[in-house]
Image (cartoon, helix red, strand yellow):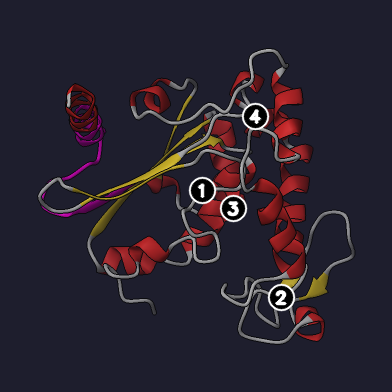
Amino acid sequence: MNHLKDQDASKQDQKEFLLSLPGMEKGCKRLVIILGLLGDFDSIEYIQMLVRYLPCLEKANIKLLVIGIGSEEGKKKFCEFTKLPHNYITVVDHIDIHQKLGLNTCRMSIYSPIINLLLMCAGINSPGTLNEVLRGYVGDKNAQPIFKPDDIISTGILPDFKGKLFEGAGGKGFLRPFEMATLRLGNMTEVLFNWSQYMINNEYLSQRGGTFMLDEGNKFIHIHRSNALLSYSHNMSKPISYLEQYIKVQ
């Protein structure tokens, strides 16, 4: 019983902390997304999935706040690449917020941060990561396509090509084979070529993020804490599905 009381108290503390953040207006739903380093796979991909819903959030009067670990220089680069308007994101150079919200570090202390990240990429101490990597190559009929036929896709490594190419690899109306893997390849290239802007502190390479949504009465209506690489949503086939009941998708 005391354990449950401690959980309730912790949840209340976290709610009060979220409500104290700048821009958390009263009287509307609020969506707070906490990212790890700006160059983390999850950080870039999550925001790429989210930006297409920004007009829907505005119409539904849902206040969005994104907080990531980075510098102002990295923020500018991140916003240019993901198309997230600057006014939605705040950067910090520490993990105080992550700790206050009980977010996972996924850090194995006996290894260096780089080795730890490589182990996570291999699925060690990162449940579900290998399945998610595999999904990127084989496709997912439960997920929406990423690229439109006329999109020009540039990975920084492969020759540029049009999104229509994926139709030949699987069809239309769902996530085709290699489509997500191609997006991730472009994201990885972007980060590797601009590592110093995106990754301000290697000690935070394994820091995971989280999503918190509150209603008009300050009640939690959605909480997700990532516990692995490429697990920024409870439903990776439909990573923004938690918003569907509150917005009208255009």
Q: Quadrant of the C terminus?
A: bottom left
Magenta highlight on residue 19: yes
Residue 83 seen: no
In x, y percent, where is residue 147?
A: 66, 73
Residue 234 included in the magenta stretch of the image: no
Where residue 108 appears, x then y in whole percent?
Answer: 64, 20
Q: Amino acid at mark 1?
A: Tyr
Residue at disc 1, secondary structure: loop
Which tag is nearer the camera, tag 4 or tag 1?
1
Of the two numbered discs 1 and 2 on the same chain, state the one appearing first in sequence: 2
- The earlier-in-sequence mark between 3 and 1 is 3
Check disc 4 and report the residue beneath it: 199
The mark nearer the N terminus, 4 or 2, is 2
User: SS of the residue at dot 2?
Assistant: loop
Which residue is denoted by mark 3 in the rendering?
45
In the picture, the disc for residue 176 is 2
> What's under tag 4, amino acid-wise?
Met
